């Protein structure tokens, strides 16, 4: 079981705050740390945004893939 520096439960945030909140949490991680994202849908668009904005600086591992809950471990390289 992974140990997470932070956990973000995305449904708790208004739509326009979700991605900025997630990126702020990611940016606060130390190299080698990991955060957990919990969401009510596949966060694939967020993964694409990470690829554009944090290229080669993150890892993305699905821990649970629906149908009701998606959990992703996002690590900082």
Image (cartoon, rainbow, N blue to C red):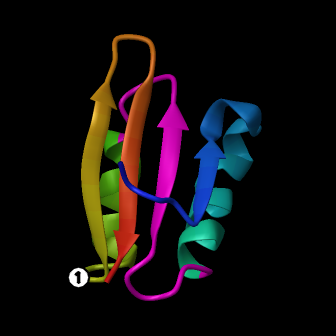
Rendering coords of residue 3 (x, y %):
47, 59
Q: Is residue 14 above or below residue 8?
A: above
Q: Is residue 56 above or below residue 24?
A: below
Rendering coords of residue 15 (x, y %):
68, 38
In the picture as drawn, the residue positioned furthest to the front comes out as 1
Q: Is residue 2 above or below residue 31?
A: above
| Circle 1 Cα neighbour tier, 10 Å, few/some/many (<14 / 14–19 / ≥20) | few
Looking at this view, is 40 or 73 the one in front? Answer: 73
Q: Quadrant of residue 63?
A: top left
* Magenta stretch, main secondary structure class: loop
In the picture as drawn, the residue positioned furthest to the bottom comes out as 31
Residue 30 inside the magenta-drawn segment: yes
Please give the name of the residue rendered at 38% of the width and 55% of the height, measured from the top-left corner. Answer: 2
Please give the name of the residue rendered at 34% of the width and 18% of the height, measured from the top-left corner. Answer: 66
- Magenta residues span 28-43
Q: Quadrant of residue 47?
A: bottom left
Please give the name of the residue rendered at 50% of the width and 46% of the height, measured from the top-left corner. Answer: 37
Q: Quadrant of the C terminus?
A: bottom left
Question: Total number of numbered labels?
Answer: 1
Kind of element beneath mark 1: loop
Relative side of 61 to 69, left or right: left
Please give the name of the residue rendered at 64% of the width and 39% of the height, measured from the top-left corner. Answer: 9
Q: Is residue 2 above or below residue 56?
A: above
Rendering coords of residue 22 (x, y %):
59, 59
Relative side of 77 to 9, left or right: left
Rendering coords of residue 68 (x, y %):
44, 12
Instruction: Determine which residue is flagged by label 1.
Output: 56
Looking at this view, is 68 or 23 the one in front? Answer: 68
């Amino acid at each position: 079981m992974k140990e997470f520096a932070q956990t973000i439960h995305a449904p708790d945030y208004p739509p326009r705050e979700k991605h900025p909140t997630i990126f702020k949490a990611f940016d606060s991680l130390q190299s080698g740390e990991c955060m957990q994202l919990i969401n009510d849908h596949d966060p694939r668009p967020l993964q694409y945004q990470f690829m554009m904005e944090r290229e080669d600086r993150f890892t993305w591992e699905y821990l649970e893939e629906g149908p009701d809950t998606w959990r992703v471990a996002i690590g900082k390289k």
